[in-house]
Image (cartoon, grey):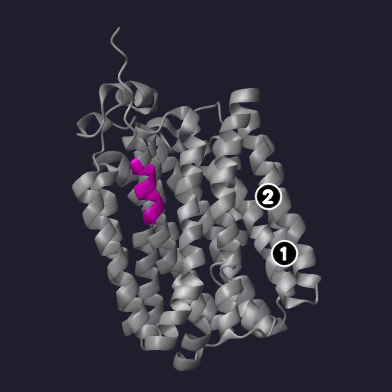
Amino acid sequence: MIGVAKATRTRHKVVTAAFFLATVLYLDRAALSVMAPVIRQDLGFSPMAMGWVFSAFVWGYALFHIPFGWLGDIAGPRRVLSGIVLLWSAFTAATAAAWNLASMLAIRFLFGAAEAGAAPNVTRAFSRWIPPGERARAQGFFLSGMSAGGALAPPLTAALLVLWGWRVTFVLLGGLGVIWAAAWYAWFTDHPANHKSVNQAELTLIASAQPANRAASISWRRLLGSANLRAILLMYFTYGYTGYIYITWFPSYLVEGRRLSVAMMGFLAALPTGLGMIAKPLGGWWSDWAAAKHGLAFGRRVVGMAGFGLAALAVIPGILVSNAYASALLLAVADGGAALAHGVCFAVCLDIGAGRAGTVSALMLTAGSLGNVLSALAFGASLQYLGSWTPPFLIGVAANLAGALLWLAIDPKKQLV
């Protein structure tokens, strides 16, 4: 009897490549927050000025999600991802040339604009390569790469900062994306059938994941009028506020609010993203398992609500406890709770987006970016005008509670297109 050919696992290599992309993306993004105390001193930035620097990235990030998501749906993620990674790597290196507030704002805006296309185009790639039953896990593993980059950024950047200063550090970090972009362009194909490492058994396995060759036409008015989509956008807005705390102001909070050394900050600031490396794939696995057992809606909602709920509950003891190390651990648990739901947020975009998964995820990311802006400025304003770290953290608690409730309004079975 002739055995049935075993399916190849090229789709898993696509997810692994996305993991390393996310690692580079967050390493480049989080490096600024680690070096912020030194840069503020060197360039004479006030807390509010630093808040504007953090938010400059987000404005570029917010404005270009939708154009790059749309471009990925049309041109394919192979070319689009390669191009945008080269762009953001160039602007990472260019940060070394900043000499005042205006130049730093311009460079970080352009850096954010280039990074905006990463997640929508990975989501678009997954829509062709990943079967529905593996999507939350794939998104969770991809997003855990962001946590890996965020965890790597504090110790690596602190070490490079001590050795060569902040300007050389940005130049060195810029080289990593160039390597990834070249490898992706040479290896990846937009269609699994065109990849030399994919056999017929794997093609059959992932056939249900593939949308039409051309993205379906869609009415923007109808899309934006969907109550389902509005619930997703509001939910991710709340995630954007709280998630941005840990890649912007958290290192400064440990140094200035908890009076820890830069060396100790480099270790403790990696805790939130370190937990996220575990929580994101775990949440994806939990969601796919629960969906198989109890239905898609339950599988997505239970993880989203549990993650956001834990994120809210851990913050209050984290900011009230007197011990600095206990505070860092509790706040890391809060970020890890939200990370548990992160992959599910993007899995929902695949569930409802189909051939427009890139565009739908771009809209969600745009909403999250608005939360990022509010977070960056809330901390800057609270420090400069109130002299307190507490109010913006409490806003985050309310945001996470609202986000948990919004999951009840999200129906992953109701496709938008």
What residue sits 23% from the left and 53% below the top? 183
Q: Secondary structure at mark 1?
A: helix
Q: Which residues are magenta?
A: 13-21
Q: Quadrant of residue 379?
A: bottom right
Q: Is residue 186 visible?
A: yes
- Side of 231 where 164 appears, left or right: left
Q: Quadrant of residue 91?
A: bottom left
5 or 177: nearer the viewer:
5
Query: Is 5 covered by the magenta stretch?
Result: no
Residue occupied by mark 1: 330
The answer to whether marks 1 and 2 mark residues whose Cβ atoms lie closer than 8 Å is no
Query: Is 17 covered by the magenta stretch?
Result: yes
The x and y percentages for residue 195 are: 22, 34
Specify the quadrant that holds the N terminus.
top left
- Side of 140 where 97 appears, left or right: left
314 or 213: nearer the viewer:
314
Q: Is residue 356 above or below residue 80?
A: above
Q: Is residue 227 visible?
A: no
Q: Which mark is residue 308?
A: 2
Q: Is residue 59 above or below residue 281?
A: below
